Amino acid sequence: MGKYDTAKLRNLGIVAHNSAGKTSLVEAILFNTGMNAKLGKVDDGSSSMDFEEEEIKRKATLTASLNHCTWEDHSLHIVDTPGVSNFLHDTRRCLRVLGGAVVIVSAISGTKSQTKQIWNWCDQFEIPRIAFVNKMDKERADFLKAVDDMEKSLGARAVIVTMPIGAEEDFKGTIDLIKMRARLYKFDEKGTYDEVDIPAEMMDEAEGLREQLLEAIAESDDELMEKYLEGEALTEEEMYHGLREGVLTSVFTPVFCGSATANIGVRQLMDYIVACMPSPVDKGVQVGVKPFTEDPVERQPSEEEPFSAMVFKTINDPYAGKLTLMRLYSGTLKPDTVVFNPNKDEKERIGNILEMEGKKQVPMDLAAAGDIIAVPKLKVTATGDTLCDLKEQVMFEPLVPLKPIISFALEAKSKGDEDKIYTGLQRLMEEDPTLTTSRDDETKEMVISGMGQIHLEVAVERLKRKYGAEVVLKEPKVPYRETIRASTQVQGKYKKQSGGRGQFGDVWIEVKPQPRGTGYEFIDKIVGGSVPRNYIPAVDKGIQEAMKNGPLTKNQVVDVQITLYDGSYHSVDSSEMAFKVAGSMAFKKAMEACNPILLEPVMAMEITVPDDCMGDVIGDLNSRRGKVVGVEPQANSQVIRAEVPMAEVLRYAPELRSMTSDRGMFSMEFSKYEEVPSHQTAKILADMGEA
């Protein structure tokens, strides 16, 4: 048997937008359970969960970190997740394997678009939630306004379980609407309090909110509903049962309140986490497929089942090596065990098994169904892979990474660092599948892509700190294309005869424009052997090589039709090389006569913005030469679909954040090439000339 009965495990993500107080809540939980000797603080850099240098510098969680603790004979695995929009992909990966989530709602700012995105992922993964209204002791705190904002923006049915006594500097404690008792706190950071009667002046409000709570609880269970309608009082035990049923079925979201930094209301929240949140047993069967077939396979959350687990995160340390984080869905796992990776069709040897405590790891003798563990130095296993028993194999569906939305060119700060940069980037991409790199054959640049400018800046900082490779981020070159408007017929003649064997190739070609997106077409209309058959492929090759460097910007020429219809040759001096050069000369001459034009890549964008920002965002898109193709209303927001030239949105992420007060989100992908307006072409060519 594992360290804890699987039914007494709680795998939780602490989620919300940035600065709502997620890390502070985790620190309070760890302090209350004795895992930490003192209450860690984000502001002074003493947090045990935000330990990366980039996180301490920015005072924000940028990568999910894990810890565990014990409360009321239950084991809590806690994941502190990022709330910064550039790093939500890490939150999404963790949610894929978690059993429940505590959603933090700020008593000052309510919820933001990042919380809504996380809430939608919780819906997608069927994750039960409870909510904690934080910062009740701060200026402008308003509990009921925060709950109302949560209902409107998230579409949640919020049911208040604890209510605050006072707010801002008058915040004194909480009222438990099930026990109908008040807690007055001593504000000593230890979470100590006196349990007292509810203040008389608050009794009417408390009874009104309790009635709403009773009604919601009764609706979660038919027997409770019958008893409630008949006017019978529900026992405290029945209320806990109904509350748990409501959470597990996501019929409603219980709401609690307090202050994480002052450690107020946190112990109450922990009591309800144990009482209401699901265990792996409650989550039930995990369905996968038999590897290399489509036959469904089920795994129950039991130690008696064959071992199975999913990898949800990879951590690379230049000194300690690679750590692979996984959630066990079934069975048990011991050190020095050989398991199977069906994604890679290879065996892996499990050496040590570790339990994460922030940046520390503690060895384990045994892991069981429901546990979240780390395994060092696996050879082939990556984020999203399944690990399973050698004989009883299963593969769970991996989570498809989000598509990058912004790219920058990378340039080494010092010559000779290329190997270090390449190795470091490979390690970073193992940790973060949304981070991608490529080499653009046209622009000759190394391009790094990610979820936002901050995401890439942090990646560059880690590249320097962890792997000693310094790079500079530059705006990438736009991969323009060139094409033609007119047709022409030209001769390309290459003649080089200066004693001995010379070179001779002579071709006549017709060049015509093709419809946009058609590409390149070569037509052979040689008759009578004016160009020998064995030289015709060389003509084609010479033209295609010349097309790589158009006359305007040295970019690829596209959408042209070339017809080779005449030429001549020399029985001694002609060669493949001569006809290749002749073809190239003919094409270059033709381009000058065919009215060449510039094409630019156009991106298809999907932008989600609050209702009050839609006008500003559409106006901004118009100023970027964008074309809005549709607007779809959603709850308190609008989804704008638009086509915008790539050159106009290379730095769109920070600009959208500014326009929407960090409430907007977008994705984009390449759509097509379109002609650049003549005045814009002149500006582009002038800029290139200056460069």
Image (cartoon, rainbow, N blue to C red):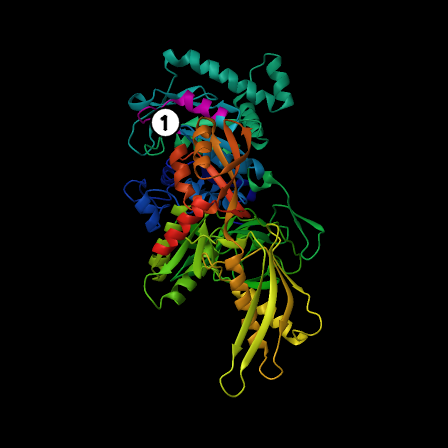
Residue at horizontal 55 percent and vertical 39 percent from the top: 279
Q: Nearer the viewer, residue 252 or 383?
A: 383
Q: Quadrant of the C terminus?
A: bottom left
Residue at horizontal 32 percent and vertical 61 percent from the top: 413
Answer few, some or many: residues within 10 Å of disc 1's Cα (few below 14, many 20 plus, some between 14 and 19): many
The vertical placement of 383 against 106, above or below, is below
Q: Nearer the viewer, residue 652 or 144?
A: 652
Q: Is residue 588 left or right of residue 563?
A: left
Task: Report the number of discs.
Answer: 1
Q: Position of residue 367 (x, y in %)?
A: 53, 52
- The residue under label 1 is 108
The vertical placement of 644 against 166, above or below, is below
Q: Position of residue 351 (x, y in %)?
A: 50, 62
Range of the magenta residues? Answer: 134-152
Q: Position of residue 375 (x, y in %)?
A: 49, 57
Q: Nearer the viewer, residue 110 or 557?
A: 557
Residue at horizontal 56 percent and vertical 21 percent from the top: 216
Residue 230 visible, this angle: yes
